[in-house]
Amino acid sequence: MPTLTADALVHHLRQLTDAGGADNRLIVASRDYYMVFSGRRGEPELLAEAVGNFYLPRAAELTPARQSQLTQRRFGERPGRNNMLRTVRGGSDEALHSFAAEVLEIFAKAYGVDPGEPAEFDLQLGDPEPTRNPDLLRLMRLLSLKRDWDTRKLVYQCLLATSLLVAIDPDNGGEPLEAGSLGQFPSWAAFSDIDALRLWQPKGAPFRVTRVDELVPKAVDKRIGSLLINPKGNVGGELYINELESLHGAIQRRASRV
């Protein structure tokens, strides 16, 4: 396994602006701790995200003193985000080496991971996943305020006309991931867009873009407890099995009229 060194960091960070596309990401992880760096080809600015207690298991949570290591290095909260972030200008070798030294200090003093320890470097280069669902998000926000049947029906109709990013389990043939449970029944997780998925798992997670009118029959057949939409996100909800069955009925009626 690679080790956490300044040279390794600089090598990977440089690729965020020199290669790939408009959604380049580097995840540097050791034990329970990680940082995510985002950049775009041809642009010197990087966004650094440092994992905090919202995503850490209880045994690995940061003490106030360890958290202060992040704020001392200009990491701060931002609206709609659960980790601490900082923007970095990393165009020159000098700037990258200086920032890499700070990253090593964060891992050592905030996370207890010393330079030279084993670390994973996951470099993801490319353009943004294009799925977006602005109408669905607008209606879900409206439903959270009005909570009436007419708005709920509009949400259902919008869902059946769209696709979602469904979290999958690569170790189970790419089947939907059991992301939770409702009683004895598993729950699946689906996301309106890639940003919502990354609020759930900032490091990213395997997914498959799936039409909702294909996902619902499968969910009913598998007897899942619920479908989580944008868990840990800013706009989300949960469809229970009775709602999924009702949607399945609507899909079948629509198919019979074709």
Image (spheres, rainbow, N blue to C red):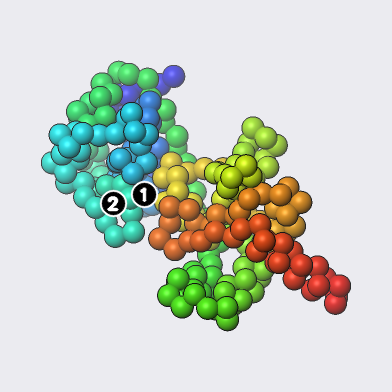
Q: Position of residue 186 (x, y in %)?
A: 62, 44
Q: CA distance from mark 1 to mark 2?
A: 7 Å
Q: Are marks 1 and 2 in contact (CB under 8 Å)?
A: yes
Residue drawn at point x = 34 percent, y = 59 percent: 80
186 lies above or below 245: above
The dot on residue 39 is 1
Q: Position of residue 48 (x, y in %)?
A: 30, 45
104 lies above or below 23: above
Q: Position of residue 209 (x, y in %)?
A: 62, 54
- Residue type highlighted by circle 1: Gly
**Along the horizontal axis of the image, is 40 left or right of 111?**
right
Mark 2 lies on residue:
45
Residue drawn at point x = 25 percent, y = 34 percent: 62
Give the structural element (helix, strand or loop) at label 1.
strand
Residue drawn at point x = 49 percent, y = 75 percent: 147
Local crowd size for mark 1, using a 10 Å CA cut-off: few (<14), some (14–19), many (≥20):
many
